[in-house]
Image (cartoon, rainbow, N blue to C red):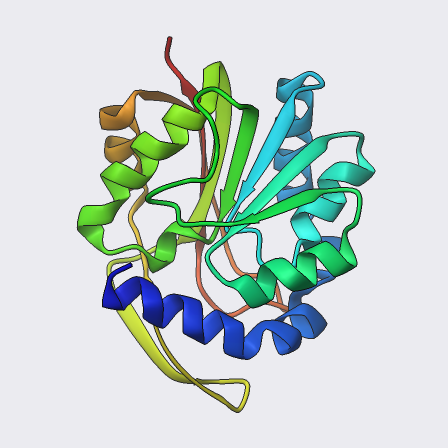
Amino acid sequence: MGADRARVRGSYDTVAEEYLGRIGDELAHKAVDRALLGVVVEEAAGGVVADLGCGPGHVAGWLTGRGAEVVGVDLSPRMVGLARREQPRAAFRTGDLLALPAADGEFAAAVALYSVIHLEPEELAPAFAEMRRVLRPGGVLLVSFHLGTEVRRMREWWGHPVDVDFHFLESDTVAERLAGAGFTVEVRMERAALPEEAPTRRGYLLARRTA
């Protein structure tokens, strides 16, 4: 694991409990996110959904509550431990977006909500290639991210010392990387921040793995 990935892992290990307390119920006030996740559940048609960058498992918990079988993957062992504790109906694995701990075509669908923002620009393409590898042909992938071109490095997060970069992304850039990895983008959305969120615009792409 490179130094950048180690910084991300260490930072999320540090804030894991605080993150769960502050973010664990965020879907309660995110109607757009719930609607898109509902599309993913329907598209999976009873197959397994991967939650890539699952954090403490709150999205996985929402998905299992709608009847989906879910496997969450996160770089942070502490986050995975919390997810296993909080969401016993889902399965969780420690792993990297650049080398997913999953078999070829294992998943019917996948979500990657605000997880690709911690990748370096040159890592987007290989990460999307990995996501394509673990999806079955025709499987869908929902990606969300903060819109923009800046990079924010956080040294403190909720009073905890961290060292993690947040890469804001443009929808066109993400769509191009997805297309290059073998996806067809079918839905593109943007929205403003909700009062409960950090004040950034949000981007969503729903893409389908080509055969």
Q: Residue at x 61, y 31 (%)?
A: 49
Residue 162 is situated, as x and y percent measured from the top left of the image, at 41, 82
Find residue 26 and report its image quarter. Answer: bottom right
Above or below for 84 versus 184: below
Residue situated in front as seen by the camera: 33 or 195: 33
Residue 96 is situated, as x and y percent measured from the top left of the image, at 40, 49
Above or below for 47 versus 127: above
Above or below for 152 versus 2: below
Find residue 137 and report its image quarter. Answer: top left
* Residue 173 in view in this figure: no
Q: Residue at x 27, y 66 (%)?
A: 4
Q: Is residue 209 left or right of residue 148?
A: right
Residue furthest out toward the top? 211
Specify the quadrant that holds the C terminus: top left
Q: Is residue 31 left or right of residue 7?
A: right
Residue 182 is situated, as x and y percent measured from the top left of the image, at 30, 20
Q: How many marks?
A: 0
Above or below for 23 versus 125: below
